[in-house]
Image (cartoon, helix red, strand yellow):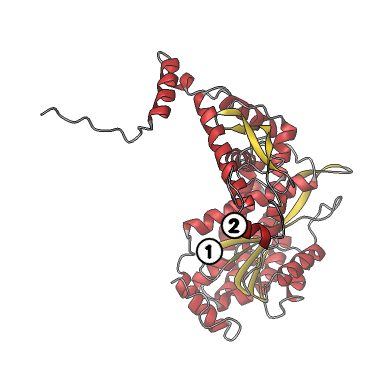
Amino acid sequence: MPRRKAKSPNTFGPELEELLLQAAKEAAGKPISEALKPDSGSLLSKMIGRVVELAMQEEMTEHLGYGPNERMDLDLAQHLGAAQRPNHRNGHFDKTIKTTQGPVQIQVPRDRQGTFEPQVVPKGKSLTAELEERIISMYTAGMSTRDIEEHFTQFYGAQANSQFISRVSSRVDKELVDWRNRPLEAVYAVMLVDAIFVKVRHSQGVKATAIYQVCAYNDDGQLEILGLYMPDDGQTAESASFWHKVFSELHSRGVQDVLILCADGLEGIEKAGRALWPQLHFSPCVVHLVRASTKYVARQDREELCRDLKTIYRAASFEAAMAAQEGFGEKWRSRYPRVVGQWEDNVLALEGLWKFSPMLRKLIYTTNAIENVHNQQRKVLKTKRSLPSRDSALRLMTLLARKITDKNLARSRTRPHWRKIVAELHIHFDGRIPSTWGFMYQ
Protein backbone atom coordinates (compact mmCIF):
# COMPACT_ATOMS: atom_id res chain seq x y z
CA MET A 1 0.00 0.00 0.00
CA PRO A 2 1.55 3.33 -1.04
CA ARG A 3 2.55 5.62 1.80
CA ARG A 4 0.25 8.61 2.19
CA LYS A 5 2.00 11.94 1.78
CA ALA A 6 1.76 14.17 4.86
CA LYS A 7 -0.09 17.43 4.29
CA SER A 8 1.86 20.59 5.03
CA PRO A 9 0.41 22.76 7.81
CA ASN A 10 0.95 25.78 5.52
CA THR A 11 -1.23 24.39 2.68
CA PHE A 12 -4.08 26.67 1.57
CA GLY A 13 -7.07 26.24 -0.70
CA PRO A 14 -6.61 25.63 -4.47
CA GLU A 15 -7.01 29.30 -5.48
CA LEU A 16 -4.48 30.57 -2.95
CA GLU A 17 -2.12 27.70 -3.73
CA GLU A 18 -2.17 28.81 -7.38
CA LEU A 19 -1.24 32.36 -6.37
CA LEU A 20 1.55 31.11 -4.14
CA LEU A 21 2.88 28.94 -6.97
CA GLN A 22 2.96 32.01 -9.22
CA ALA A 23 4.89 33.97 -6.58
CA ALA A 24 7.30 31.05 -6.07
CA LYS A 25 8.07 30.98 -9.80
CA GLU A 26 8.84 34.71 -9.73
CA ALA A 27 11.14 34.26 -6.74
CA ALA A 28 12.94 31.16 -8.04
CA GLY A 29 16.68 31.61 -8.34
CA LYS A 30 16.75 34.77 -6.19
CA PRO A 31 18.13 35.15 -2.65
CA ILE A 32 15.36 34.87 -0.05
CA SER A 33 16.06 38.44 1.13
CA GLU A 34 15.43 39.74 -2.40
CA ALA A 35 12.44 37.49 -3.02
CA LEU A 36 10.68 38.77 0.12
CA LYS A 37 11.80 42.39 -0.29
CA PRO A 38 8.91 44.80 0.29
CA ASP A 39 7.30 45.83 -2.96
CA SER A 40 4.01 47.60 -3.57
CA GLY A 41 3.16 45.05 -6.28
CA SER A 42 4.23 41.91 -4.46
CA LEU A 43 1.85 39.09 -3.70
CA LEU A 44 2.19 39.60 0.04
CA SER A 45 1.32 43.29 -0.25
CA LYS A 46 -1.79 42.41 -2.28
CA MET A 47 -2.81 39.80 0.29
CA ILE A 48 -2.42 42.33 3.11
CA GLY A 49 -4.50 44.84 1.18
CA ARG A 50 -7.25 42.31 0.51
CA VAL A 51 -7.39 41.24 4.18
CA VAL A 52 -7.73 44.90 5.21
CA GLU A 53 -10.51 45.42 2.65
CA LEU A 54 -12.43 42.36 3.85
CA ALA A 55 -12.06 43.48 7.46
CA MET A 56 -13.47 46.90 6.55
CA GLN A 57 -16.39 45.30 4.76
CA GLU A 58 -17.18 43.29 7.89
CA GLU A 59 -16.95 46.47 9.95
CA MET A 60 -19.40 48.16 7.56
CA THR A 61 -21.81 45.23 7.88
CA GLU A 62 -21.68 45.53 11.66
CA HIS A 63 -22.11 49.32 11.44
CA LEU A 64 -25.21 49.11 9.21
CA GLY A 65 -26.68 45.97 10.73
CA TYR A 66 -27.00 44.06 7.46
CA GLY A 67 -24.74 42.65 4.77
CA PRO A 68 -24.34 43.54 1.08
CA ASN A 69 -27.44 42.89 -1.05
CA GLU A 70 -29.51 41.99 2.04
CA ARG A 71 -33.07 43.30 2.33
CA MET A 72 -34.24 44.94 5.51
CA ASP A 73 -37.00 43.10 7.34
CA LEU A 74 -40.33 44.98 6.92
CA ASP A 75 -41.11 44.84 10.64
CA LEU A 76 -37.68 46.24 11.44
CA ALA A 77 -38.17 49.04 8.92
CA GLN A 78 -41.54 49.95 10.50
CA HIS A 79 -39.96 49.83 13.97
CA LEU A 80 -37.32 52.28 12.80
CA GLY A 81 -40.01 54.45 11.26
CA ALA A 82 -38.48 54.26 7.81
CA ALA A 83 -39.83 52.99 4.53
CA GLN A 84 -36.32 52.06 3.55
CA ARG A 85 -32.97 51.60 5.18
CA PRO A 86 -31.94 54.75 7.11
CA ASN A 87 -28.35 54.27 5.93
CA HIS A 88 -26.73 52.13 3.26
CA ARG A 89 -23.52 51.50 1.36
CA ASN A 90 -22.34 54.20 -0.99
CA GLY A 91 -19.44 52.79 -2.99
CA HIS A 92 -15.82 53.21 -1.92
CA PHE A 93 -12.78 55.42 -2.24
CA ASP A 94 -9.14 54.54 -2.87
CA LYS A 95 -6.51 54.90 -0.16
CA THR A 96 -2.84 53.97 0.14
CA ILE A 97 -1.59 52.59 3.43
CA LYS A 98 1.96 51.85 4.54
CA THR A 99 2.67 48.29 5.68
CA THR A 100 5.68 46.09 6.38
CA GLN A 101 5.41 44.96 2.75
CA GLY A 102 5.48 48.46 1.31
CA PRO A 103 2.67 50.81 0.19
CA VAL A 104 -0.64 49.03 -0.43
CA GLN A 105 -3.62 50.54 -2.24
CA ILE A 106 -6.99 49.56 -0.80
CA GLN A 107 -10.65 50.36 -1.37
CA VAL A 108 -12.35 51.81 1.70
CA PRO A 109 -16.15 51.35 1.83
CA ARG A 110 -18.30 54.35 2.67
CA ASP A 111 -21.90 54.86 3.71
CA ARG A 112 -24.51 57.38 2.58
CA GLN A 113 -24.56 59.31 5.88
CA GLY A 114 -20.77 59.36 6.27
CA THR A 115 -20.87 57.91 9.80
CA PHE A 116 -18.70 54.83 9.16
CA GLU A 117 -15.44 54.93 11.17
CA PRO A 118 -13.13 52.02 10.20
CA GLN A 119 -10.99 50.64 13.00
CA VAL A 120 -8.49 48.60 10.95
CA VAL A 121 -7.02 51.78 9.45
CA PRO A 122 -8.76 54.80 11.04
CA LYS A 123 -9.73 57.87 9.06
CA GLY A 124 -6.91 60.30 8.43
CA LYS A 125 -4.22 57.65 8.88
CA SER A 126 -2.11 56.10 6.16
CA LEU A 127 -0.05 53.99 8.52
CA THR A 128 -0.91 50.65 10.08
CA ALA A 129 -0.84 50.44 13.88
CA GLU A 130 2.11 48.03 13.70
CA LEU A 131 4.35 50.50 11.86
CA GLU A 132 3.18 53.39 14.01
CA GLU A 133 4.23 51.45 17.12
CA ARG A 134 7.61 50.69 15.53
CA ILE A 135 8.23 54.35 14.72
CA ILE A 136 7.42 55.37 18.29
CA SER A 137 9.62 52.55 19.61
CA MET A 138 12.57 53.74 17.49
CA TYR A 139 11.95 57.33 18.59
CA THR A 140 11.93 56.25 22.25
CA ALA A 141 15.17 54.31 21.72
CA GLY A 142 16.88 57.58 20.83
CA MET A 143 16.98 57.39 17.04
CA SER A 144 16.72 60.78 15.36
CA THR A 145 13.87 61.46 12.96
CA ARG A 146 16.32 61.33 10.05
CA ASP A 147 17.67 57.95 11.20
CA ILE A 148 14.11 56.63 11.47
CA GLU A 149 13.36 57.99 7.99
CA GLU A 150 16.29 56.06 6.50
CA HIS A 151 15.43 52.90 8.44
CA PHE A 152 11.76 53.17 7.47
CA THR A 153 12.55 53.53 3.76
CA GLN A 154 15.20 50.79 3.72
CA PHE A 155 13.26 48.10 5.55
CA TYR A 156 9.62 48.89 4.77
CA GLY A 157 9.87 50.33 1.28
CA ALA A 158 7.75 53.35 2.21
CA GLN A 159 8.64 57.02 2.04
CA ALA A 160 8.33 58.96 5.30
CA ASN A 161 10.05 62.29 5.84
CA SER A 162 11.15 63.63 9.22
CA GLN A 163 8.06 65.88 9.54
CA PHE A 164 5.80 62.87 9.01
CA ILE A 165 7.67 60.87 11.67
CA SER A 166 7.43 63.79 14.10
CA ARG A 167 3.66 63.92 13.52
CA VAL A 168 3.38 60.18 14.18
CA SER A 169 5.31 60.58 17.44
CA SER A 170 3.09 63.49 18.50
CA ARG A 171 -0.02 61.29 18.13
CA VAL A 172 0.79 59.71 21.49
CA ASP A 173 0.66 63.08 23.29
CA LYS A 174 -2.82 62.57 24.73
CA GLU A 175 -1.88 59.08 25.89
CA LEU A 176 1.24 60.46 27.56
CA VAL A 177 -0.72 63.25 29.25
CA ASP A 178 -3.08 60.60 30.65
CA TRP A 179 -0.07 58.60 31.88
CA ARG A 180 1.45 61.62 33.62
CA ASN A 181 -1.87 62.30 35.34
CA ARG A 182 -2.88 58.73 36.21
CA PRO A 183 -4.26 58.06 39.72
CA LEU A 184 -1.67 57.01 42.31
CA GLU A 185 -1.66 54.98 45.51
CA ALA A 186 -2.71 56.72 48.73
CA VAL A 187 0.53 55.93 50.60
CA TYR A 188 4.13 55.60 49.46
CA ALA A 189 6.77 54.40 51.89
CA VAL A 190 9.86 55.86 50.24
CA MET A 191 9.73 58.64 47.65
CA LEU A 192 12.86 59.78 45.79
CA VAL A 193 12.98 63.08 43.92
CA ASP A 194 15.63 64.63 41.71
CA ALA A 195 15.96 66.73 38.57
CA ILE A 196 17.78 65.79 35.39
CA PHE A 197 19.10 68.57 33.16
CA VAL A 198 18.39 68.33 29.44
CA LYS A 199 19.37 70.77 26.68
CA VAL A 200 16.14 72.25 25.32
CA ARG A 201 15.52 75.07 22.87
CA HIS A 202 13.59 77.94 24.48
CA SER A 203 12.53 81.23 22.96
CA GLN A 204 15.83 82.65 24.32
CA GLY A 205 17.94 79.85 22.83
CA VAL A 206 19.19 76.38 23.86
CA LYS A 207 19.61 76.01 27.62
CA ALA A 208 20.14 73.16 30.08
CA THR A 209 16.69 72.77 31.62
CA ALA A 210 15.64 70.98 34.79
CA ILE A 211 13.10 68.18 34.28
CA TYR A 212 11.66 67.15 37.64
CA GLN A 213 11.16 63.43 38.27
CA VAL A 214 9.56 61.56 41.15
CA CYS A 215 10.14 57.87 41.88
CA ALA A 216 8.73 55.80 44.71
CA TYR A 217 8.57 52.24 45.99
CA ASN A 218 4.98 51.03 45.82
CA ASP A 219 3.45 48.56 48.26
CA ASP A 220 4.92 45.52 46.48
CA GLY A 221 8.46 46.93 46.64
CA GLN A 222 8.84 47.92 42.99
CA LEU A 223 10.32 51.22 41.88
CA GLU A 224 7.82 53.25 39.89
CA ILE A 225 8.17 56.64 38.20
CA LEU A 226 5.18 58.57 39.53
CA GLY A 227 5.57 61.80 37.66
CA LEU A 228 7.62 63.91 35.32
CA TYR A 229 7.30 67.70 35.25
CA MET A 230 8.75 70.58 33.28
CA PRO A 231 8.58 74.32 34.05
CA ASP A 232 7.30 76.91 31.59
CA ASP A 233 9.35 78.29 28.73
CA GLY A 234 12.38 80.22 29.95
CA GLN A 235 12.52 78.63 33.40
CA THR A 236 15.56 76.36 33.52
CA ALA A 237 16.94 76.15 37.08
CA GLU A 238 15.77 73.71 39.77
CA SER A 239 13.80 75.43 42.53
CA ALA A 240 12.02 74.48 45.76
CA SER A 241 8.96 76.50 44.71
CA PHE A 242 8.47 74.31 41.64
CA TRP A 243 8.99 71.18 43.76
CA HIS A 244 6.09 72.42 45.91
CA LYS A 245 3.99 72.58 42.75
CA VAL A 246 5.08 69.01 41.88
CA PHE A 247 4.12 67.73 45.35
CA SER A 248 0.77 69.52 45.10
CA GLU A 249 -0.01 67.74 41.83
CA LEU A 250 0.99 64.38 43.32
CA HIS A 251 -1.33 65.09 46.26
CA SER A 252 -4.20 65.90 43.89
CA ARG A 253 -3.55 62.60 42.07
CA GLY A 254 -4.23 60.67 45.26
CA VAL A 255 -0.99 60.62 47.29
CA GLN A 256 -2.31 61.27 50.79
CA ASP A 257 0.86 60.45 52.71
CA VAL A 258 4.58 59.94 52.16
CA LEU A 259 6.53 58.26 54.96
CA ILE A 260 10.10 59.05 53.88
CA LEU A 261 11.24 61.62 51.33
CA CYS A 262 14.77 61.30 49.92
CA ALA A 263 16.28 64.23 48.03
CA ASP A 264 19.49 66.11 47.40
CA GLY A 265 20.54 69.16 49.38
CA LEU A 266 18.41 71.72 47.53
CA GLU A 267 17.43 74.39 50.03
CA GLY A 268 13.70 74.49 50.75
CA ILE A 269 12.78 71.09 49.34
CA GLU A 270 12.10 69.65 52.81
CA LYS A 271 9.66 72.49 53.57
CA ALA A 272 8.02 72.00 50.18
CA GLY A 273 7.36 68.34 51.03
CA ARG A 274 6.11 68.99 54.55
CA ALA A 275 3.66 71.58 53.24
CA LEU A 276 1.68 68.66 51.73
CA TRP A 277 2.68 65.80 54.04
CA PRO A 278 3.47 67.35 57.45
CA GLN A 279 4.59 64.07 59.11
CA LEU A 280 7.08 62.93 56.47
CA HIS A 281 10.60 61.96 57.48
CA PHE A 282 13.14 63.82 55.34
CA SER A 283 16.39 62.04 54.51
CA PRO A 284 19.07 64.03 52.65
CA CYS A 285 20.97 62.04 50.04
CA VAL A 286 24.38 61.15 51.46
CA VAL A 287 25.91 60.75 48.00
CA HIS A 288 24.98 64.33 47.14
CA LEU A 289 26.44 65.52 50.45
CA VAL A 290 29.71 63.76 49.68
CA ARG A 291 29.83 65.23 46.17
CA ALA A 292 29.22 68.71 47.55
CA SER A 293 32.13 68.24 49.97
CA THR A 294 34.67 66.87 47.50
CA LYS A 295 34.38 69.95 45.28
CA TYR A 296 36.77 71.64 47.69
CA VAL A 297 39.22 68.72 48.03
CA ALA A 298 42.44 68.27 46.06
CA ARG A 299 42.44 65.27 43.74
CA GLN A 300 45.27 63.50 45.59
CA ASP A 301 43.31 63.68 48.89
CA ARG A 302 39.86 62.85 47.55
CA GLU A 303 39.96 59.05 47.80
CA GLU A 304 41.30 59.06 51.38
CA LEU A 305 38.84 61.71 52.53
CA CYS A 306 35.87 59.85 51.03
CA ARG A 307 37.02 56.70 52.79
CA ASP A 308 37.03 58.58 56.10
CA LEU A 309 33.56 59.98 55.40
CA LYS A 310 32.23 56.44 55.06
CA THR A 311 33.11 55.81 58.70
CA ILE A 312 30.62 58.57 59.57
CA TYR A 313 27.52 57.81 57.49
CA ARG A 314 27.99 54.03 57.69
CA ALA A 315 28.48 53.99 61.45
CA ALA A 316 26.43 51.48 63.42
CA SER A 317 24.77 54.16 65.58
CA PHE A 318 24.43 57.92 65.86
CA GLU A 319 26.82 57.88 68.83
CA ALA A 320 29.44 56.07 66.71
CA ALA A 321 28.85 58.55 63.88
CA MET A 322 29.54 61.49 66.22
CA ALA A 323 32.76 59.83 67.38
CA ALA A 324 33.81 59.26 63.75
CA GLN A 325 33.02 62.89 63.01
CA GLU A 326 35.36 64.04 65.79
CA GLY A 327 38.16 61.89 64.38
CA PHE A 328 37.45 63.21 60.89
CA GLY A 329 37.68 66.79 62.18
CA GLU A 330 40.97 66.24 63.96
CA LYS A 331 42.50 64.75 60.81
CA TRP A 332 41.25 67.16 58.12
CA ARG A 333 40.39 70.47 59.81
CA SER A 334 43.77 72.09 59.14
CA ARG A 335 43.59 71.43 55.37
CA TYR A 336 39.84 71.50 54.69
CA PRO A 337 38.06 73.43 57.46
CA ARG A 338 35.07 74.11 55.19
CA VAL A 339 34.50 70.39 54.56
CA VAL A 340 34.77 69.59 58.28
CA GLY A 341 32.27 72.34 59.08
CA GLN A 342 29.86 70.97 56.47
CA TRP A 343 29.95 67.49 57.99
CA GLU A 344 29.42 68.77 61.51
CA ASP A 345 26.09 70.08 60.19
CA ASN A 346 25.46 67.02 57.99
CA VAL A 347 25.73 64.53 60.86
CA LEU A 348 23.06 66.43 62.78
CA ALA A 349 20.85 66.53 59.67
CA LEU A 350 21.27 62.75 59.29
CA GLU A 351 20.52 61.98 62.95
CA GLY A 352 17.14 60.43 62.14
CA LEU A 353 18.81 57.95 59.78
CA TRP A 354 20.14 55.84 62.65
CA LYS A 355 16.76 55.04 64.11
CA PHE A 356 16.26 52.64 61.20
CA SER A 357 17.83 49.23 60.62
CA PRO A 358 20.76 48.88 58.17
CA MET A 359 18.41 47.40 55.52
CA LEU A 360 16.06 50.39 55.57
CA ARG A 361 18.94 52.83 56.03
CA LYS A 362 20.58 51.50 52.88
CA LEU A 363 17.34 52.11 50.98
CA ILE A 364 16.93 55.74 52.01
CA TYR A 365 20.40 57.19 52.54
CA THR A 366 20.96 57.71 48.82
CA THR A 367 18.92 58.53 45.71
CA ASN A 368 20.92 56.07 43.60
CA ALA A 369 17.69 54.40 42.46
CA ILE A 370 16.53 57.54 40.68
CA GLU A 371 20.08 58.19 39.48
CA ASN A 372 19.86 54.81 37.75
CA VAL A 373 16.69 56.00 36.02
CA HIS A 374 18.56 59.11 34.87
CA ASN A 375 21.41 56.98 33.51
CA GLN A 376 18.98 54.97 31.37
CA GLN A 377 17.54 58.20 30.02
CA ARG A 378 20.97 59.71 29.33
CA LYS A 379 21.81 56.74 27.06
CA VAL A 380 19.09 58.03 24.76
CA LEU A 381 19.69 61.74 25.32
CA LYS A 382 23.39 61.51 24.42
CA THR A 383 22.40 60.87 20.79
CA LYS A 384 20.73 64.29 20.65
CA ARG A 385 22.55 67.61 20.89
CA SER A 386 19.39 69.33 22.05
CA LEU A 387 15.63 68.90 21.91
CA PRO A 388 13.80 71.34 19.60
CA SER A 389 11.08 72.45 22.03
CA ARG A 390 9.62 72.03 25.49
CA ASP A 391 6.82 69.81 24.12
CA SER A 392 9.22 67.47 22.31
CA ALA A 393 11.39 67.21 25.44
CA LEU A 394 8.41 66.38 27.62
CA ARG A 395 7.18 63.83 25.04
CA LEU A 396 10.51 62.00 24.78
CA MET A 397 11.17 62.02 28.54
CA THR A 398 7.67 60.71 29.25
CA LEU A 399 8.07 57.93 26.69
CA LEU A 400 11.33 56.94 28.38
CA ALA A 401 9.82 57.15 31.87
CA ARG A 402 6.85 55.00 30.85
CA LYS A 403 9.13 52.44 29.21
CA ILE A 404 11.35 52.19 32.30
CA THR A 405 8.36 51.88 34.65
CA ASP A 406 6.66 49.23 32.50
CA LYS A 407 9.92 47.26 32.37
CA ASN A 408 10.34 47.40 36.16
CA LEU A 409 6.76 46.32 36.79
CA ALA A 410 6.89 43.57 34.14
CA ARG A 411 10.04 42.09 35.66
CA SER A 412 8.47 42.18 39.13
CA ARG A 413 11.70 43.48 40.61
CA THR A 414 10.96 43.69 44.31
CA ARG A 415 13.40 45.48 46.57
CA PRO A 416 15.65 42.95 48.42
CA HIS A 417 14.44 42.18 51.97
CA TRP A 418 11.20 44.04 51.20
CA ARG A 419 9.11 41.97 53.61
CA LYS A 420 11.44 42.83 56.51
CA ILE A 421 11.54 46.49 55.46
CA VAL A 422 7.72 46.59 55.38
CA ALA A 423 7.54 45.06 58.86
CA GLU A 424 9.87 47.79 60.15
CA LEU A 425 7.87 50.53 58.43
CA HIS A 426 4.74 49.31 60.20
CA ILE A 427 6.58 49.69 63.52
CA HIS A 428 8.00 53.18 62.89
CA PHE A 429 4.91 54.56 61.15
CA ASP A 430 2.16 52.74 63.02
CA GLY A 431 -1.29 54.11 62.20
CA ARG A 432 -0.22 55.89 59.02
CA ILE A 433 -0.37 52.86 56.69
CA PRO A 434 -3.04 50.14 56.37
CA SER A 435 -2.32 46.91 58.23
CA THR A 436 -2.14 44.95 54.94
CA TRP A 437 0.13 47.47 53.20
CA GLY A 438 3.21 45.85 51.68
CA PHE A 439 2.12 42.27 52.39
CA MET A 440 -0.38 41.85 49.57
CA TYR A 441 2.07 40.36 47.04
CA GLN A 442 4.34 38.52 49.44
> Dot 1 lies on which element?
loop
Please report the residue visible at 69 percent of the width from the left and 53 percent of the height from the top.
176
Residue 6's place in the image compared with 330, above or below, is: above
Task: Give the farthest residue toward the right.
Answer: 204
Of residues 216 and 320, the one drawn nearer to the viewer in this rendering: 216
The residue labelled by disc 2 is 306
Residue 148 falls in image quadrant: top right
Nearer mark to the viewer, of 2 and 1: 1
The spot of residue 85 in percent (x, y) is: 68, 51
Q: Is 240 positioned to the left or the right of 304 in the image?
A: right
The spot of residue 147 in percent (x, y) is: 65, 30
In the image, what residue type sits under mark 2? Cys
The spot of residue 263 in percent (x, y) is: 68, 64
Q: What crowding class fits label 1: few (fewer than 14 Cα within 10 Å), some (14-19), or many (20 or more)?
A: some
The spot of residue 15 in percent (x, y) is: 42, 28
- Specify the quadrant that holds the N terminus: top left
On residue 222, the disc is 1
**C-alpha gap between disc 2 and disc 1:** 31 Å
Please report the residue visible at 47 percent of the width from the left and 75 percent of the height from the top.
439
